[in-house]
């Protein structure tokens, strides 16, 4: 038996010396590196939805994902440098807050392809993907104004930045297309990851008679949804279908389909070895924003027809 073991060991070593080693299972696969937005996974909104698109690409396209959070790297710049040095074919930056650091790293790695989501860069090796959040928010505003009994509604933003202001502007436009004199309360929380603060702002708005609330505030907005449910008023979710976070309150959600946009970019790269260059802007016409299924509402036929009419008019103008 000892002699047989020695022979097997000798043959194994001989085959290894001849270069007949086991093939690397990752060889030939597309590698994608991802630096998550500042609030990271678990925000039940932007980051989680974007990551779902990457997981879909992993499962259906066989890609390899490397992802980092600020808790891992300390700074965006460290994260982007690590991903650029890891042999990733594409490096994604999720969120506008990482743009400055991304551009600094992209300048140092001119041969690396980067993708920036939710902001626009002029650098040649950065593809920018933005969404027409205002278009989807117009629809949210129409819904809010149509179903509000008090004709007082509220908007909560995460931080007061141009991206989030587009959500607010669309919401106001949509609501005022239904009722030009409707009262719209607006407050910026200064944070995307504080559900307690989101609930507190929502409670103050409800105390001031707001009966439909909408937020573009990440996990802060989840606090709003839950406070709306607690106090028996309506809410509208954002980015993903957030009905399941407050099933008695969420009428619908303004869907910003980041998951599908990221999947399409990765699929294109796998098929052609290239991605779109410059700035890619996606809106209602590209099926990138819209509304989730309606729930909770129990409208009369007349009210439903009125809501449908407003939505059809708005969407026809966006096509």
Image (cartoon, rainbow, N blue to C red):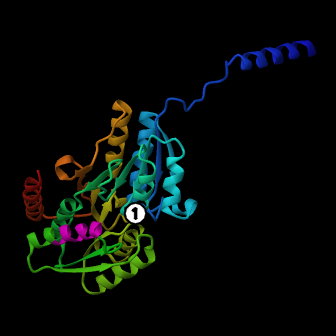
In-front residue for pair 244/284: 284
Give the SS element for disc 1: helix
Camera-side residue of 110 and 278: 110
Left or right: where 42 falls relative to 116: right
First to last magenta residue range = 162-172
Residue 44 in the image, given as x and y percentages of width and height: 42, 61
Tell me the quarter of the picture where residue 219 sits.
Answer: bottom left
The percent position of residue 287, horizontal first and vertical second, equals 22, 48
**Main SS of the magenta segment?**
helix
Task: Answer with left or right where residue 133 lies relative to residue 247.
Answer: left
Task: Name the residue rendered at 36%, 42% in the picture.
Answer: 263
Q: Which residue is mark 1?
A: 100
Residue closer to the observer: 313 or 250: 313
- Residue at (44, 73) in percent of width and height: 195
Q: Is residue 34 visible?
A: yes
Percent across and percent down for residue 34 are 46, 50
Going by the image, does 166 lie left or right of 53? Answer: left
> In the rendered structure, does residue 29 fall within the stretch colored magenta?
no
Q: Look at 45% across and 52% down and name the residue there.
A: 108
Name the image quarter holding residue 276.
top left
Front position in the image: 311 or 17: 17
Residue 118: image quadrant is: bottom left
- At x 23%, y 56%, the residue is 291
- Are there few (<14), some (14-19), or many (20+) residues within 10 Å of tag 1? few
Q: Residue furthest right?
A: 2
Q: Is residue 235 above or below residue 133?
A: below
Q: Is residue 152 above or below residue 295?
A: below
Q: Position of residue 120 (x, y in %)?
A: 29, 57
């Amino acid at each position: 038996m000892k002699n047989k073991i020695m022979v097997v060991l000798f043959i194994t070593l001989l085959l290894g010396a001849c270069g007949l080693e086991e093939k690397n299972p990752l060889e030939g696969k597309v590698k994608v590196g991802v630096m998550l937005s500042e609030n990271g996974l678990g925000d039940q909104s932007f980051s989680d939805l974007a990551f779902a698109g990457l997981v879909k690409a992993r499962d259906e396209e066989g890609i390899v994902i490397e992802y980092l959070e600020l808790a891992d790297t300390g700074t965006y710049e460290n994260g982007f440098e690590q991903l650029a040095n890891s042999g990733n074919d594409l490096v994604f930056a999720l969120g506008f807050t990482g743009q400055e650091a991304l551009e600094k790293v992209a300048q140092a790695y001119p041969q690396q392809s980067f993708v920036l989501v939710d902001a626009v860069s002029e650098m040649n090796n950065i593809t920018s993907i933005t969404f027409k959040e205002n278009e989807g928010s117009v629809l949210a505003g129409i819904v809010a104004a149509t179903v509000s009994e008090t004709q007082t509604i509220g908007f909560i933003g995460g931080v007061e930045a141009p991206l989030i202001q587009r959500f607010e502007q669309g919401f106001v436009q949509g609501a005022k297309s239904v009722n030009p004199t409707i009262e719209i309360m607006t407050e910026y929380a200064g944070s995307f990851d504080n559900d307690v603060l989101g609930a507190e702002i929502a409670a103050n708005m409800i105390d001031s008679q707001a009966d439909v609330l909408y937020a573009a505030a990440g996990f802060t907005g989840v606090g709003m949804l839950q406070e709306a449910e607690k106090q028996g008023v309506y809410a509208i979710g954002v980015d993903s279908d957030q009905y399941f976070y407050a099933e008695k309150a969420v009428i619908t959600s303004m869907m910003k389909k980041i998951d599908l946009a990221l999947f399409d970019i990765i699929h294109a790269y796998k098929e052609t070895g290239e991605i779109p260059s410059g700035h890619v802007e996606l809106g209602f016409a590209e099926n990138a924003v819209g509304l989730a299924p309606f729930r909770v509402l129990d409208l009369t036929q007349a009210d439903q027809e009125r809501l449908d009419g407003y939505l059809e008019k708005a969407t026809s103008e966006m096509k």
